Amino acid sequence: MRSTLIVLLFVLLLLGGCHSKQVRHLASDASLIKAGQSTLQDVQLLLGEPDGRREVGPGVTEYVYYEDRPGFLGNMPVLGPMAGPSGYEMIIITLKNDLVTSCEFRNFSESDRQWVEDYTWEEVK
C-alpha cells in the first residue's frame, strides 16, 4: 500500500512536468525587429498581440510586450507556480504610421531596487 502511494505520487510529479506553457523569448524576438524596415504586421506575426498599447502622438503608437522571468524554482512542475519571478523582460516598440521607428529591449531584476533600502537618504529642506 505504501509503495503504491509513493509510485503514484512519483508518477503524478512526472506527469506534471509534461505540461508546458508557450514561452516567448523576447530578447531574440527583439533582434528580429528592425527600425525603419519592420511593419506592424511583422511585429504582430513575431510577437502576437501586445500586453500594452498607447497612443503617444498623432500616428505614433507604442506597443509593450512583457514576460516574467521565472525564479530559482520557477521551472519546476509543482513548485514553479508558487515561486515568484526573479525579474522581467520588456520590449517597447514605437511605430509611426505602422512602421517601426524604435525597438528597445529591457531586462529588469528584482535586485535592481535593493539600493533603495541601503541608501542613506538626506532630508530635503
Image (spheres, rainbow, N blue to C red):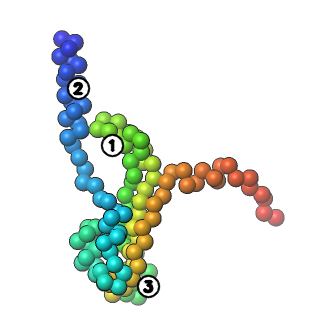
The answer to whether the residue labelled 2 contacts the one labelled 3, judged by CB atoms less than 8 Å apart, is no
- Number of other residues with Cα within 10 Å of mark 1, as a class: few under 14, some 14 to 19, many 20 or more: some
Could you tell which of marks 2 and 3 lies nearer the N-terminus? 2
Of the pair 5 and 55, the residue shown nearer to us:
5
The residue under the point 23% across, 46% down is 20
Residue 93 % position (x, y): 38, 74
Query: Which mark is on residue 10?
Result: 2
- Give the labeled residue for mark 1: 75
Could you tell which of marks 3 and 1 lies nearer the N-terminus? 3
Vertical comparison of 101 with 66: above or below? below
Q: Is residue 74 left or right of residue 123?
A: left
Cα distance between the residues tagged 2 and 1 = 17 Å
- Give the labeled residue for mark 3: 57
Q: Amino acid at mark 3?
A: Gly
Asked whether residue 52 appears in the rendered view, the answer is no
Asked whether residue 59 appears in the rendered view, the answer is yes
Q: Amino acid at mark 1?
A: Asn
Choose top left, top right, bottom left or bottom right for residue 122.
bottom right
